[in-house]
Image (tube, rainbow, N blue to C red):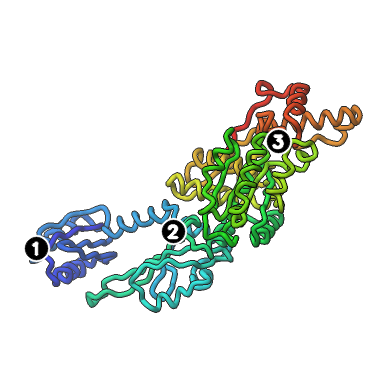
Amino acid sequence: MRLEIRCENRLGITQDVLEILVRHQIDLQGIEVHTNKLFIHFPNIEFAEFQHLMPEIRRINGVSDVLKVAFMPLELESAEYQNQLISTTEKWLTVSASGELIRLSTSANGYFSRLLKHDLIHVFDWIKGFNLQKWLDKQPKERLLAVAEVAEQTFQLELQPVWLNNNKGLQGFAGATIRFINGHSQYPNEQKANAICNSIVQQSAAMRKVVRDGKKLAANLQPVLLVGEIGVGKGLVVELMHALSSTNNKALIVVELTADDVSTQLTKVNLDVCGGLYLKHIDRLGAAQQKNVLAWLLSNRNKLQQVKLYASANNNLTLALQQGTFNEHLFYQLADSKLVVPNLRQRLEDVAELSQLFVEQICLDSGIAPIDIADDVIKRLTEYSWPGNASQLHNVLRQAVVLSDQQCIQLANIHIEEDQQEDELLTVQDYLENGLDEAVKQFESTLLRKLYPYYPSTRQLASKLGLSHTAIANKLREYGINRSTVKIARRS
């Protein structure tokens, strides 16, 4: 039972109420003192005893009224606070003045528990690179931005001191709230590379090699060509190399080479403020566009000597060079070094962590509470071949978040086309049953039928396979592959 006692702000009223409870032998479970109000919480009592209790309290000098209430104010406040802890997508925690962990948001608990794989009680043991204890010992009064490491990953921290009125009516230092800021745009240049590196999942040896090689290639101003399928994260690798480059104090400018008027796009680039220039999709350039890009590069040769050049292609351009469909001079202007970014099928060890990060970001963007992923869902995702790479994985998970009960993604929420779940290759016996020529055609038909849903444009498919547009069009016609016979997949 809970009562609200409306009264004057007289010091002795609380004592008078407690004496009445003692006379009635009622155990007190809680008491709260507010301005002009006093709340008490005790076990339910018989109605007859309650009839005597209420008038006695009302007769206390200074009491104006006594009401039954459903909840104590702190109970409501605690419930609201718990809802905030559960629903917020921000990662934050609070510590006492001595550094003892008091509480942390559900998002922070889930994320750092996965990262550290042990309990988070001893904050000093897992927040590294910033002397939290020394800062707390100073009893600071101003907010502080700092950079620290957790499990060899770099984070920007926002530390907010907490000061409360103590029993002497004076302000006392109670501890601090620590918020882990999302994204890396706020980081100083010397820390940005570490922050970007954190966002590249590299549980697989293949991705660790990409990061390792990318760091080496960032050391000089030689151009770098990145090769990899759509959705593998070439842009993120470019961001990492730019952050590590000697020109990172200037902007990284990205140019999508997909418009017809490429020359106009390039003339808008201000090389005076450019530290890195990223030319995307050079493999999609026609012959005339290739000449225009080469001409622009040569005409700006002097300014480009102080700019790190990056280019990307979805396929290896070596065959295009041999066939004469890609300008050799342009190739060597942009491909002084080459970095191959693996597809998701080559780095399935990364799928579990990528899935966790994607769901966390989707929830953050949608403004909903963090969602767990069931173990059987993780198993299913890591067994799939992901022809659409990380972009396809992100789309599947975004739909799963919408379809879930917003507590945990279940297997029923994961929708992957059934025809994508078949084996990617036929058995050797099936291939060789009718001879080598027929086996080659069967392999071609199977491969094109698998790729066509993701590259329905003959030009895209030709670029993907390093063949001419005419050759691909003829093969699609021969095998009866078109939009009416093959279901087109949703693209990122």
Q: Residue furthest right?
A: 435
Question: Comparing marks 1 and 3, which lies closer to the viewer?
Answer: 3
Where is residue 179 shown, x and y percent of the image? 43, 62
State which tag comes first along the sequence, 1 or 3. Answer: 1
Where is residue 317 shown, x and y percent of the image? 74, 42
Amino acid type for the residue under numbered disc 3? Ser
Distance in Å between CA atoms under marks 1 and 2 = 46 Å
Q: Which mark is residue 406?
A: none
State which tag comes first along the sequence, 1 or 2. Answer: 1
Callout 1: SS: loop
Placement of 16 over or under 309, stated as above or below:
below
**Mark 1 crowdedness (10 Å alpha carbons): few <14, some 14-19, many ≥20:** few
Placement of 191 over or under 335, stated as above or below:
below
Q: Is residue 378 visible?
A: no
Task: Residue under label 3, please give it.
Answer: 463
**Mark 2 crowdedness (10 Å alpha carbons): few <14, some 14-19, many ≥20:** many
Q: Is residue 328 visible?
A: yes
Task: Residue under label 1, please give it.
Answer: 59
Amino acid type for the residue under numbered disc 1? Arg
